[in-house]
Image (cartoon, rainbow, N blue to C red):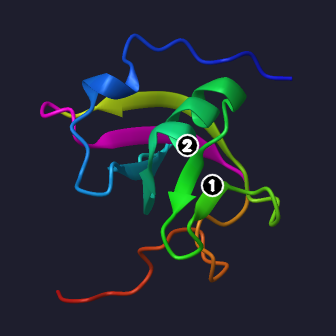
Amino acid sequence: MKQALKCDFTWADFKTNSDGMVPVVVQDAENDEVLMLAYMNEEAFETTLRLGKMTYWSRSRNELWTKGLSSGHVQYVKQLLIDCDNDTILAKVEQVGAACHTGNRTCFYRTLAE
């Protein structure tokens, strides 16, 4: 079992949105590709630190969601960074399989404008 991550922040240090969550931008730790955006509440944050696997709060299912638990497409935490306002997390991960629920490597696979 992976050892818990060391973190100098507590949930109280975050500026959460009106739902008590913070957005998480997820990047591939190896090549900085943006993989997805998700949200964490306190339980998801603490679970991520404990497991070393990205865990989010699913707003659509209203439940805790450890990435890859059902799909096998796990995100192993390599580094968590906080922005200057303490209201957004940048997660650098080792992505196993696809990050997107559509089966694409990244959720950002469609061009909107050029």
Left or right, 93 with respect to 15, comes to right
Q: Which of 57 and 113 is in front in this view?
A: 57
Q: Which amino acid does label 1 sit on?
A: Leu
Residue receiving disc 2: 44
* Residue 54 in view here: yes
Q: In this view, does 82 lie above or below 40?
A: above
- Quadrant of the drawing holding the N terminus: top right
Q: Which amino acid does label 2 sit on?
A: Ala
Q: Is residue 46 above or below residue 24?
A: above
Q: Nearer the viewer, residue 114 or 35?
A: 35
Residue at (60%, 18%) from the top-left corner? Answer: 5
Q: Is mark 2 on a helix, strand or loop?
A: helix
Among the 4 quarters of the image, the one containing residue 77: top right
Left or right, 28 with respect to 34, comes to right
Determine contact: label 1, label 2, CB under 8 Å. yes
Residue 7, percent across and down?
46, 14
Among the 4 quarters of the image, the one containing residue 63: bottom right
C-alpha distance separating marks 1 and 2: 6 Å
Q: Is residue 44 above or below residue 56?
A: above
What is the magenta range?
84-96
Q: Is mark 1 on a helix, strand or loop?
A: strand
Per the rendering, the mark at residue 64 is: 1
